[in-house]
Image (cartoon, grey):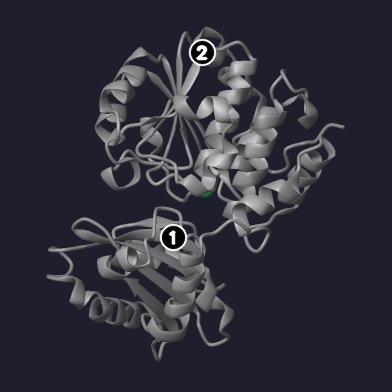
Amino acid sequence: MTFSHYAMNSITSGNISRLCSLIDSAGYITVTAHMKPDGDATGSSYALMRFLGAAGKKACIVFPDRIPESLAFIIDPEDRGKIISAADDIASATHAVASSDLIFCLDFNRFSESRCGKMADILSGSGAMKVLIDHHLSPETERFGLIFSETEISSTSELLFWILMAMPQTGGNAAMLPPPARKALLAGMTTDTNNFGNSVFPSTLKMASALLEAGTDRDDILYHLYNEYGENRVRLLGRLLYHDMKITGDGVAYMILDRKTLSEFDIHEGDTEGFVNRPLEIGKVRMSCLLKEDDGFFRVSLRSKRGISANRCAMEYFHGGGHELAAGGRLYMPGDIASPEEAAGYVEKATHEFMTAGNE
Ligand SMILES: [Mn+2]
């Protein structure tokens, strides 16, 4: 069974043949994605690495930092040691990029410190050909030699799926993808859509259907994603929603996770995935903010309901951006606020200004 790739402007026969010749002529290939890799970054990167491997190419993954333990199931056990984290092993990360004549940049669109961490300088300094495959708004187009950028799509995993379907190696048949690549793509799309809760397009369901038909075990993916949490995560979510969440008069819910709470609940990277969506279950809440304390800043996640632009709020008040209804950024200390105690006041003031400034 074959599939067309819908209205995806960047998947043209010209771009696909360019991509094929770049891959053909590359001696060594690096695949990289954004900091704090999530399911989409991890799934798309690993699927691409396996696809390239099956095509006889030498390729590796270099992430700015480690993938969370909760997403390790996406990677085959024998490949787990092969994924380089620049934060843990800057020498190997630098060496991999320096040895590469082709670099794939997945699920991010600019070489900033907040998106690429320790990889920002390494990537900026590399003269290798760079290919962007991404679904975020406003890519830094001049930095890439070939661009696959779509925003009307669920995820980078889905975009990559349709690119791979257009390649001669698959001929549009998902069953031609290596099984670990199929699993990784379905896992990445599932996390970015909150298990089909948002950003689902006709093409998204076609992709899911093709992967299921090819034999991908979706139940296994769901089990690993949603039924293997530590007790600490669920209890922390309970406390946040019951005790800590504030809702402003403008319909903005916010929750602040400070260092003390994170260590009290023994929270690791990835454990708070999905928390920010929960306040949107409340009818009167139009936007939700989650702040998580880090080194010298709070990591900010924003989710909004239709008609409110989380992307604009993230750009205007939190040095960030992303998608229309799901975005992220940072709140710096010092800079934006003097101390962690000022975070709540900043969020209330910023979101009040934003929500009352004719935001549509
Ligand atoms: Mn994504």
Which residue occupies 71% across, 18% down? 169
* Residue ranking furthest to the right: 1
- Mark 1 nearby-residue class (10 Å; few <14, some 14–19, many ≥20): many
Dividing the picture into quadrants, the one containing residue 66 is top left
Q: Is mark 2 within 8 Å of ligand 1?
A: no
Dividing the picture into quadrants, the one containing residue 4 is top right
Q: Position of residue 3 (x, y in %)?
A: 80, 35
> Which of the two labelled residues, at mark 2 and mark 1, occupies the earlier sequence position?
2
* Residue position marked by numbered label 2 in the rendering: 58
Foreground tag (2 vs 1): 2
Q: Are marks 2 and 1 in contact (CB under 8 Å)?
A: no
Q: Tell me if residue 134 can be seen.
A: no
- Mark 2 nearby-residue class (10 Å; few <14, some 14–19, many ≥20): some
Three-letter amino acid code at the position of disc 1 = Ala
Q: Using residue 205 as the reference point, say whether residue 145 is left or right of it.
A: left
Q: Tell me if residue 299 can be seen.
A: yes
Tell me, for residue 359, which label it has, or none: none
* Residue position marked by numbered label 1 in the rendering: 327
Q: Position of residue 284 (x, y in %)?
A: 53, 87
Count of numbered circles on the image? 2
**CA–CA distance between discs 2 and 1?**
34 Å
Dividing the picture into quadrants, the one containing residue 295 is bottom left
* Residue ranking furthest to the bottom: 249
> Callout 2: helix, strand or loop?
loop
Q: Position of residue 270 (x, y in %)?
A: 45, 54
> Callout 1: helix, strand or loop?
strand
Pick whichever, 141 or 218, lies toward us: 218
Which residue occupies 20% across, 71% down? 340
Three-letter amino acid code at the position of disc 2 = Lys
Picture quarter with the N terminus: top right
Which residue occupies 63% across, 14% down? 55
